[in-house]
Image: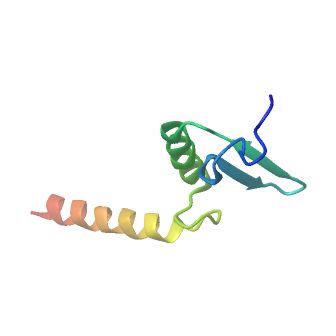
Amino acid sequence: MQFLKNEVPFNSWECITLQLEHRDVDLIIDNEKSMKMFLKILSYKMNSIDGSKDSAQKIKEFMYNGIKKQLARKNKD
């Protein structure tokens, strides 16, 4: 693949670096829809709201406890 002198092969939003325990993995996903889907799946699997692993755990627990309380009140009536 040959590029012009002032042309870059991809845009910055098409790149993502996954920092694994022993290495970094750089990915280029040039389709915006595919990149959004990948990021959603990655966030879900990492249990993340801010890019850090398990950062969504407290929020999930809070929501789960709220639903439990609502169901308990509903069953009480």
* Quadrant showing the C terminus: bottom left
Q: Position of residue 57 (x, y in %)?
A: 53, 65
Residue ranking furthest to the left: 77
| Total number of numbered discs in the rendering | 0
Question: Which of the 4 quarters of the picture holds residue 7?
Answer: top right
Q: How are the residues colored?
A: rainbow
Depth check: give the residue in front, 8 or 54. 8
Left or right of 51, for residue 63? left
Residue ranking furthest to the top: 1
Q: Position of residue 50 (x, y in %)?
A: 56, 67
Question: Which of the 4 quarters of the picture holds residue 52?
Answer: bottom right
User: Which residue is painted at 45% across and 63% down in the image?
Assistant: 60
Question: Which of the 4 quarters of the picture holds residue 48?
Answer: bottom right
* Quadrant showing the N terminus: top right
70 over 45 or under it: above or below: below
23 over 31 or under it: above or below: below
Residue ranking furthest to the front: 5
Q: Position of residue 47 (x, y in %)?
A: 57, 57
22 over 54 or under it: above or below: above
Depth check: give the residue in front, 62 or 56. 56
Depth check: give the residue in front, 60 or 70. 60
User: Which residue is painted at 77% across and 48% down in the image?
Assistant: 26
User: Which residue is painted at 90% across and 55% down in the image?
Assistant: 22
Residue ranking furthest to the right: 22
8 over 63 or under it: above or below: above
